[in-house]
Amino acid sequence: MKTIKSFTDLGENRPLTVIAGYLGAGKTTLINRMLAEAKQPFAVIVNDLGALAVDHALIAGQQGSTLTLTNGCACCQISADLAAQLATLRQADFSALVFEASGVAKASRLATITSQAEGYELAKVVTLVDGFDAPRLLKDPYLSPLIKEQIAAADWVLQTKRLDVVDPALALLAPDLKRLAGDGPLPEQLAPEYRFARRTSQGSGITAPSFQHRVIYPSKDLTPDALKAFIAAQPAIERVKGWLVNPPDGVLVQATRAHFQTQAATSPQGLGLQFIWRGGDEIDFSALT
Amino acid sequence: MIDVYLAKAIITLNPSLPEATAIAIRDGEILEVGNVESLSPWLIRDDHQIIETFKDCVIVPGFIDPHLHPAMAAVILPMHFITAMPWSLPWCDVPASLTPGAFDQEMQRINESADDEILIFWGHHDLWHGLMNRDRLDAIDAKRPIVAWNRSFHELHMNSACMAQLGITEASISGRAQIDFASGRFFENGLSFAIQKLNPYILSESRFTLGLERLKQVVHVGGHTTIGDMAVGLFDFERELATTHAIFEREDTPFRIEQVPHGAVVTHNRSFEETHAALAELSANSSHRLNFRKRVKLFSDGAFFSQLAQLLPPGYLDGHVGEWLTAPEVLHEHILNFWRAGYQIHVHVTGDMGVEVALEGLAKAQAEHPRVLHGFTLEHMGYATPEQIERAKALGASVSANIYYLHELSGRYAELSVGYERASTMGRLKTCFDAGITTALHSDFTMAPAQPLLNMWVAVNRLNAQGEQMGPAECITPNQALAAVTLNAAKILGIDAFTGSLRAGKRADLTILSDNPLTVDPKTIKDIQVVATVFEGRVAVIEND
């Protein structure tokens, strides 16, 4: 388990808990238990668009409201927008917010989206895994990448429904996994106000790009030989494809570090040269343009 | 009164009489297609007029785009387009801006002529326009707020004046991922922060109405007489119903809209019986131009433009994985529910793993409760394997493809996303036609221009934006491409009984072209002009320059 911050100091930002996990992992059940135990009122947002009409009905005595958020595509967020809903909720009087993710949501994406919310601070991502279903899910070709992602992005992984054993594949993915009993008081870490210290590299879903790419528009004088020499002098460049207009009929260049190939251009449009290079450093292309 | 239109050629899509030179229309319905002599038995029995206005033109069945999104278009169309691909919009022709300098020049020109409170440009693309940043926008105008929205819609940049107007400060965005304050960049999840601030402006009543009015022009100028709204409820179900009704159910609207509800929205917090009852009521209350029928739209995997399609091995070059918009087992449950109730089911599938899940759902449904002519349609189908296409045929599925992916993205995706083999075979249209699958083309506007002739051109030539031919073995013929934007598209929407081809008894939905798409040099199909449309017998002329 990760280091735990004091949770007495709520600061000005209200803590936001993301409960992730595939369908049937017990997210709604857990939230109902949290509501039953809550000392102070907290808000709940349920992101269950796409689920059948079950989850919403199950949330008993819900304090917040239901959010429908289309997964995946930012262009679908224009109106059904999580950030807008968080902003509205901010006006209400409650101590914390719990966000129930849809079963197919990538936890890292949710952590990133919720980190945008003004007035909130991501307190933790808790991922639930159904102990009976885990062996199947981790082998399912459609679902295992998603389940692994939900586990990797979590601060805390809880196995639900099964107390006797943990699937070895699951144990390997989540060495800090705890088993959550179906009754009795919840662990204090599940209180909506409880904050985990976030690992800086965790949950953003963003890693430094291993490649960069750019299209440049070469000068009319640039010859294939000069381009070849440029590539040779820049060891980070892995791939070049595009058109040169010297010779005047145009030439299509395709290059990797291993080969440099030219052929007569069938497209005379001169739409530039695409470079792909390794690492995060900039390359100065001014010699080519 | 019978109207008789003469034409250089009438391409009917009726296999028994593929070509004609005259068509007789009464009360919005086709009486007969043939020649002036063959029409005589009708003409001697009623008043008639011979109309020669289009005698040098070519008449085809009214174009049908079975999949676009009016509500999303309404948000984008009020923006100023500056794009690498040329766009022909009714209120302006957008030239191809292929360099950073050309992009800046266009921004400058529009800045000087437009009087918007916030100037929003749409279409910026790194590959052509270079990196965008705040300084570059400040140089266009330091005082007026400016937003440069990326082509993919997943990223935007703001100038300093815009950030000031929206109250965005370094402190207010500190610690948020995918926002870069210095460069004014908001991308992917960071975009939702920017959208939240821009929403009052981009969703304002006046702008949304302007957007729908513009969409009306786009649809007409593209030559359509029918479009499919392939996810009513994408933004806001009730608001979409009310505004589309107010704007499109008018005598001067020269097309109909076939409305297909967003399955996840209409089933949300309802039992299936309640959903079914609500949809039946919507169908019963359909108006003349706006029609719900027994159809539903479901979603499998993520967006193609954002590389969230779910792929079978070997996946993406960089190893990332796509996303599910609906959990596979939930999708299967939705499919079964709607299938048992006799619906025509449309499933958004972008990657081959998305196709796999949809086909499994269809196979389960067929095993439990066999149906024929059920109209189950794979929508978009960016990547699919030949074996999946064979199974789709065996299960009776249809395909509605976004072939513009190939034009805009295949060059880039070959290098940066999935490698050459799969990038060059996205949109396997010939395999679909060879299998005997009912195959249509759509724009998913604004994912692609709503110009059926442009989509036909891509499908026939498979040239990408860099001018390279990609996957020539998947080229289809001009005949097939025309069927894909007319009769096959009507079948996809389940309305081929009354439109999609020209024969006695169908509604008089016609598109009038300057030239014959079946006989011109295939490389020029996109240059054919749409001269006019006829919607249920009424002519709507298009002003060309």
Image: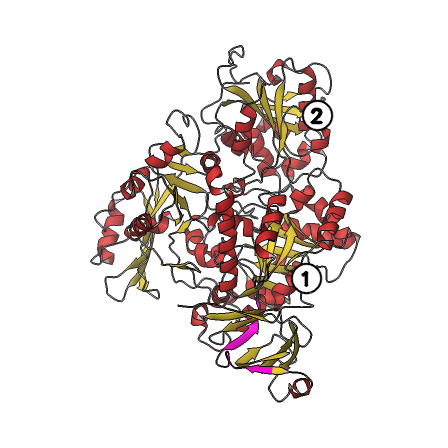
Q: Are marks 2 and 1 in contact (CB under 8 Å)?
A: no
Q: Which residues are magenta?
A: B49-65
Of the pair A271 and B117, the residue shown nearer to us:
B117
Residue B56 falls within the magenta-colored stretch:
yes
Whether residue B451 sits left or right of residue A281 in the image: it is right
Q: How many angstroms separate mark 2 from mark 1 (CA)?
A: 43 Å
- Host chain of mark 1: B
Q: Residues within 10 Å of mark 1 (few under 14, many from 20)?
A: some
* Circle 1: residue type: Gly
Residue B438 in sight here: no
As drawn, B387 above or below B115: below
The picture places residue B345, in percent across and down from the top left corner, at: 68, 54
* Circle 2: residue type: Thr
Whether residue A232 sits left or right of residue B196 in the image: it is left
Residue at image location 40% in from the left, 26% down from the top = B174
Residue A35 falls within the magenta-colored stretch:
no
Label 2 in the same subunit as label 1: no
Helix, strand or loop for disc 2: helix
- Host chain of mark 2: A
Q: Which residue is mark 1?
A: B494
Q: Which residue is mark 2?
A: A29
Residue farthest right in this picture: B369
